[in-house]
Image: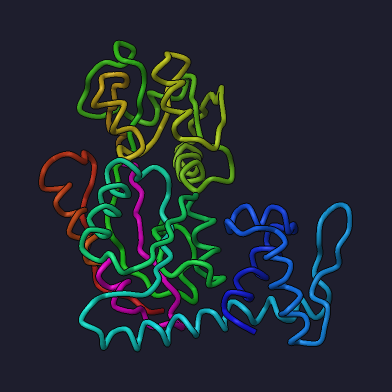
Amino acid sequence: MTPRQLKYFLRISELKSFTKAAAVLHVAQPALSRQIQQLEGDLGVKLFIRSDSGVTLTDAGKALSSRAVKLLDHLASVRDEISSFSDEIQGQLKFGIPPSFFDLLTSPLIQQYRTQFPAVELTIIEDISSTIHELILNGRLDIGIVLSIESMNGLSYRHLFDEQLFVAGASGLLDVEESISLESISSSPLILTQQPNTLRMILEDALRARNISHNVILETNSTRLQSEMAAAGIGFTVLAYSAISKEVESGKLTAIPLEDLKVTWTLVYSKDRELGSAAHQFIELLLELTVERAKSGKWPGLTIKATKKNTP
């Protein structure tokens, strides 16, 4: 039983398909099947039930699935601990971040990190806050950025920054003001994220608390589509500046701060696992880049918070 075989096993289990897993893993399907056959041979059990509709786990497969993540996590911890004795930062790091940060944070962060620490194997997952939270708890990611509304049970965390929410619309449709109230958007056609997206929940909780109605004309799980449709004049969207920075800078959108409505982003990782040097360096670079963005004025609505570590 090898780490590679366990990784292959988990991906097949997740996708419920050898074909899909082979494509994602960039491995020929016959080679993938051979690795699983060897794993089954070593263990003396069948791990998958194969059918025309895909594969499902046997009872033995379910038992291995619950342990494989912990085994790989332990191996990664050992590797990180031993690698810390090297003069060169190395190892693996799996990081989760919402897509809205791509332009202002994710892209420059990865480029700088790769330049400084080329021996680290990076895996970056872009997804919504709730999914990243789940992947951290399941051991599929080492560290991630989530909204503070997520539960911190079982996690170590540090609050990173607050982001002001903005109302954004096509240039010319919004009067340039210092801020805009929740009441003033009640009758506006809104383009929002789909429920149960956390950002949508925060906005609707604030509206409900003030007994304010609202008019949603379009829902989508894509912040890019929200921005594009707002820029096309179809309606107005409510997002943090990080999600619309490119469109605002290009003049496609006008954005006005939404009064008294902010979100807090938090860095999280499992409290059961000690982070290695690769993760610590990644976090330090993330903090440096965020502070730089705040000082330069390139990230309106950003407020840096204390970065003290918390372990519930």
Towards the viewer: 310 or 112: 112
Q: At which x and y percent is residue 125?
A: 46, 55
Instruction: Out of 93 and 292, give the one closest to the viewer.
Output: 93
- The residue under the point 44% across, 31% down is 224
Percent coordinates x, y for residue 247 in the rendering: 31, 26
The answer to whether 190 appears left or right of 259 in the picture is right
Q: Residue at x 60, y 82 (%)?
A: 2
Give the image location of residue 276, x and y in percent. 33, 79
Q: Residue furthest left?
A: 295
Q: Quadrant of the C terminus?
A: bottom left
**Horizontal arrangement in the rendering, residue 133 relative to residue 7 (left or right):** left
What residue is shown at x 31% (from left), y 19% (from top)?
252
Tag count: 0
Queried whether the magenta region covers residue 267, the answer comes back as: yes
| Coloring basis for residues | rainbow
Q: Is 105 drawn above or below residue 240 in the view shown?
A: below
Q: Residue furthest top?
A: 172
Q: Quadrant of residue 25?
A: bottom right
* The N terminus lies in quadrant: bottom right
Closer-to-camera residue (132/67): 67
Q: Residue 71 at what x, y percent from top left?
A: 57, 83
Residue 89 belongs to the span the image colors magenta: no
**Which residue sits at x=21%, y=41%?**
299
The magenta span reads: 260-282
Give the quarter of the image for residue 35: bottom right
**167 left or right, relative to 47:** left
Identify whether 175 is placed above or below 121.
above
Residue 170, placed above or below residue 36: above
